[in-house]
């Protein structure tokens, strides 16, 4: 029996994806023998509605000076964060000399839009290599994990913040009570909190179970976020659904009573009720859908191989670690994974040890099939891979359904 990370309620896992390595732990052959594994089990708390991992590796094992994910690898995401920043500037930075704090600021993909406008800003980014990219761009960044203690230090040195931002980071942090207590201290009475993460509703509806991996300790819904912030005297005042990362939700939060609550909140809570997001039976169905998706994908890959065709993985995403290890996709099925990130190239994928090769190899010798591990960037990828398609190349996909795009 385990305790819920948010409310302490007793919780039972409803599903195991089996032994998993660190999702971004791309490695060299010398490191194979010492590779770290943990059991990827998931649970849903019926009391506070939080979908969560049962175990998460230590944070330093995931976020360190060798962190393999650089936000700037997607042009589409750069545009997304520019628009996010414009929205914050236009609607929420009304006071003179405003101050913006972002956690999980990575290579500065969002904050660069505030820095270039001369707006006071601070990024909090514990992974030193990606933080350094931001610092080199002139973006003020502290290389630390955000929590309540750091919030106090920031207030002492810089004062309180007008806007507290985060993208794809809150769901990575197991000690969320310390984070929210920190936000409460750091945020001005009139300040705004805006953060976005993959939305549980999308994961359930699309069976996009690859959003479940070590870094994603939580998958949020409005119900769970409302519960969490209410514990700290804060209020969910609006939401803004996003299409990024396969379907995300942006939460807008303020100190309690400081802003009107939009009708969007109640409307989306009703949708969650209809989707059954707060019912444990929903997760039994989800488990069966994951198993079916896995069986269909592995059958399709074997069938393609049986016909003597070449298959290459497209984008060595964190999500692909769950797919590859849960479906047991071995290097004899996938020749290599093409990826644009230099520090992943020449290494091997976590767990199954499929080679990761530069994108240029894909361009130089198209395979018959490309397995789209970066499905959340499909629009961006399809637009630039017209030639692959024209030369007869086919895409294998698995979200929302397993199949071949003709
Ligand atoms: O939550 C997280 C999100 C924001 O980013 C983190 N925990 C880790 C990471 O997840 P991911 O690795 O699944 O992210 P992406 O953005 O789906 O994939 C990025 C990878 O895909 C990079 O290695 C670059 C590669 N890529 C590529 O090779 N060609 C990406 C694009 C768009 C491409 O055209
Ligand atoms: N915001 C970026 C990066 C998301 S990846 C984007 O959306 O593309 C998650 C990032 O959160 C990593 O760079 C990781 O180092 C950082 N992170 C993890 N725990 C954190 C914490 N406690 N405080 C601040 N950042 C954290």
Image (cartoon, rainbow, N blue to C red):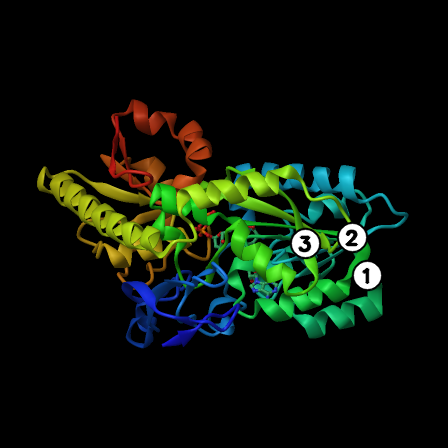
Task: Indicate the secondary structure of the residue bearing disc 2.
Answer: strand
Camera-near label (1 vs 2) is 2
Q: Residue furthest right?
A: 96
Q: Which residue is mark 3?
A: 235
Task: Indicate the secondary structure of the residue bearing disc 3.
Answer: strand
Q: Earlier in the sequence, mark 1 or mark 2?
A: 1
Query: In x, y percent, where is residue 384?
Result: 43, 30
Q: Is residue 276 visible?
A: yes
Residue that appears at 33% across and 62% down:
350
Residue that appears at 68% across and 71% down:
148
Q: Contact, CB < 8 Å: mark 1 with mark 3?
A: no
Relative to 35, is 110 above or below? above
Q: Which residue is mark 1?
A: 160
Camera-near label (2 vs 3) is 3
Q: Would you identify the image quadrant in which residue 326 lies? A: bottom left
Q: Earlier in the sequence, mark 2 or mark 3?
A: 2
Relative to 343, is 246 above or below? above
For residue 191, the mark is 2
Compute the Cα span from label 1 to label 3: 18 Å
| Category of crowding for the residue at label 1, using alpha-carbon neighbours closer than 10 angstroms: few (below 14), some (14–19), many (at least 20) | many
Query: In x, y percent, where is residue 33?
Result: 28, 75
Queried on whether the Cβ of the residue with tag 3 lies below 8 angstroms from ligand 2, the answer reads no
Q: Residue furthest left?
A: 306
In the rendered view, does 373 fall on the left or right side of 216?
A: left
Compute the Cα span from label 2 to label 3: 12 Å
Residue that appears at 76% across and 47% down:
259
Q: Nearer the viewer, residue 289 or 390?
A: 289
Task: Indicate the secondary structure of the residue bearing disc 1.
Answer: loop
Q: Contact, CB < 8 Å: mark 1 with mark 2?
A: yes
In the rendered view, does 327 fall on the left or right side of 388?
A: left
């Amino acid at each position: 029996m385990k305790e819920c990370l948010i409310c302490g309620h007793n919780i039972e896992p409803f599903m195991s994806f089996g032994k998993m390595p660190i999702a971004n732990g791309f490695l060299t052959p010398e490191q194979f023998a010492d590779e770290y594994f943990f059991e990827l089990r998931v649970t849903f708390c019926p009391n506070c509605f939080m979908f969560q991992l049962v175990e998460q590796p230590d944070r330093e094992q995931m976020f360190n000076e060798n962190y393999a994910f650089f936000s700037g690898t997607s042009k589409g995401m750069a545009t997304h964060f520019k628009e996010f920043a414009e929205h914050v500037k236009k609607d929420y930075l009304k006071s003179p000399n405003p101050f913006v704090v972002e956690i999980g600021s990575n290579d500065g993909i969002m904050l660069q839009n505030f820095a270039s406008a001369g707006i006071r800003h601070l990024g909090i980014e514990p992974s030193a290599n990606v933080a350094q990219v931001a610092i080199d761009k002139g973006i003020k960044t502290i290389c630390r994990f955000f929590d309540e203690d750091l919030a106090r230090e920031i207030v002492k040195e810089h004062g309180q913040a007008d806007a507290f931002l985060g993208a794809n980071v809150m769901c990575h942090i197991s000690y969320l009570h310390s984070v929210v207590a920190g936000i409460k201290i750091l945020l001005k009475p009139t300040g705004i909190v805006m953060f976005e993460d993959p939305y549980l509703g999308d994961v359930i509806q699309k069976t996009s179970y690859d959003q479940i991996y070590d870094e994603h300790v939580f998958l949020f819904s409005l119900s769970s976020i409302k519960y969490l912030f209410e514990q700290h005297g804060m209020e969910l005042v609006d939401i803004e659904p996003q299409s990024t990362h396969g379907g995300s939700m942006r939460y807008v939060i303020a100190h309690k009573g400081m802003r009107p609550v939009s009708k969007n909140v109640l409307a989306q809570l009703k949708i969650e009720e209809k989707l059954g997001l707060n019912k444990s039976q929903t997760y039994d169905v989800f488990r069966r859908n994951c198993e079916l998706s896995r069986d269909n994908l592995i059958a399709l890959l074997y069938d393609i191989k049986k016909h003597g065709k070449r298959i290459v993985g497209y984008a060595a995403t964190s999500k692909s670690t769950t797919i590859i290890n849960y479906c047991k996709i071995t290097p004899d099925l996938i020749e290599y994974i093409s990826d644009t990130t230099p520090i992943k190239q020449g290494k091997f994928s976590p767990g199954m040890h499929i080679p990761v090769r530069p994108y240029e190899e894909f361009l130089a010798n198209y395979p018959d099939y490309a397995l789209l591990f970066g499905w959340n960037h499909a629009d961006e990828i399809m637009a630039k891979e017209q030639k692959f398609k024209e030369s007869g190349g086919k895409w294998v996909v698995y979200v929302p359904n397993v199949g071949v795009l003709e």
